[in-house]
Image (tube, rainbow, N blue to C red):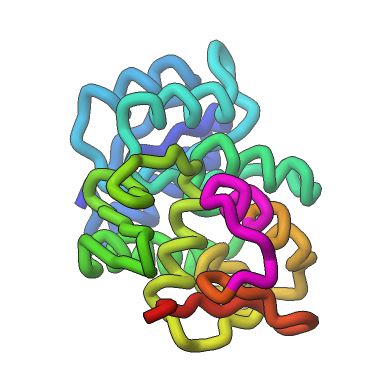
Amino acid sequence: MKILIVEDEIGIANFLKQGLEEEGYDVLVANDGKTGYDLALSQKVNVILLDWILPQMTGIEVCKSIRKTDSKTPIIFLTAKDTVQETIEGLKAGANDYIKKPFSFDELVERIKIHFRNENENDEMSLGNIKIIKSKHQILVDNQEIAFTQREFELLGYLIKNKGKVCTRNQIIEDVWDIHFEYDTGVIDVFMNAIRKKLNLNKDEELIKTIRGVGYIANDLN
């Protein structure tokens, strides 16, 4: 399995490269955004670790540019940018995950493993007239494709995978965001509002219903 590290701080890049190689991964390193973007497109990589502040292209620019042609490869931001709004911006740019510096190397390895496992789940899932095709990063409503960001895609997929069960906000922040510490779960509502708008749903509809003060539940209607 190949990992691309895009990090301009040489010490951090070398530390990550050495540690991940010891874990058995093949590792590529880019020290600026443009080189990272070029490698992401030219090399078959399984996970991209991406800093935010980079020479030539910012991490946000790299992420958005990659997502124009590659909707599937997991992208994990490793950054000192740590406000809720910055987290939302990174996830809306197409990142799958967001880890704040300083971070635990062991935690990073576990998150990488989670993204590898997620790639091997069932390719197609459905909820009512909604269909998800993971390999194509497609969401179809009555066979018409609807454009979703990476995080919206993952959140909707999580609710559908667990349809019939109440998904609490804490469960979602841990399982979708993979954040295992106290965190403002209000970020979930931002993404849920966007999902409902794209699916033309309101918060009281049974297909994806809000359980007030708890979380959400997805239900087939027939």
Q: Position of residue 215 (x, y in %)?
A: 67, 78
Q: Which residue is depicted at the point 24% across and 44% down?
A: 136
Q: Position of residue 128 (x, y in %)?
A: 37, 68
Q: Is residue 203 magenta?
A: yes
Q: Which residue is depicted at the point 31% across and 33% down?
A: 70
Position of 145 with respect to 8 (left or right) is left
In this view, the residue in front, 218 or 7, is: 218
Q: Specify the segment rendered in magenta.
A: 192-205
- Quadrant housing the C terminus: bottom left
Position of 59 with respect to 39 (left or right) is right
Asked if residue 60 shows in the view, the reply is yes
Across the whole image, how many numbered discs are drawn on residues? 0
Looking at this view, name the residue that lies furthest to the top.
Answer: 56
Is 88 drawn above or below residue 155 in the view shown?
above
- The quadrant in which residue 212 appears is bottom right
Q: Is residue 39 magenta?
A: no
Position of 220 with respect to 177 (left or right) is left
Looking at this view, name the residue that lies furthest to the bottom.
Answer: 165
Is 166 drawn above or below residue 156 in the view shown?
below
Q: Position of residue 26 (x, y in %)?
A: 22, 47
Asked if residue 99 shows in the view, the reply is no
In this view, the residue in front, 86 or 92, is: 92
In this view, the residue in front, 67 or 123, is: 123
Q: Which residue is depicted at the point 48% across and 61% down?
A: 156
Is 23 drawn above or below residue 102 in the view shown?
below
Q: Position of residue 220 (x, y in %)?
A: 41, 77
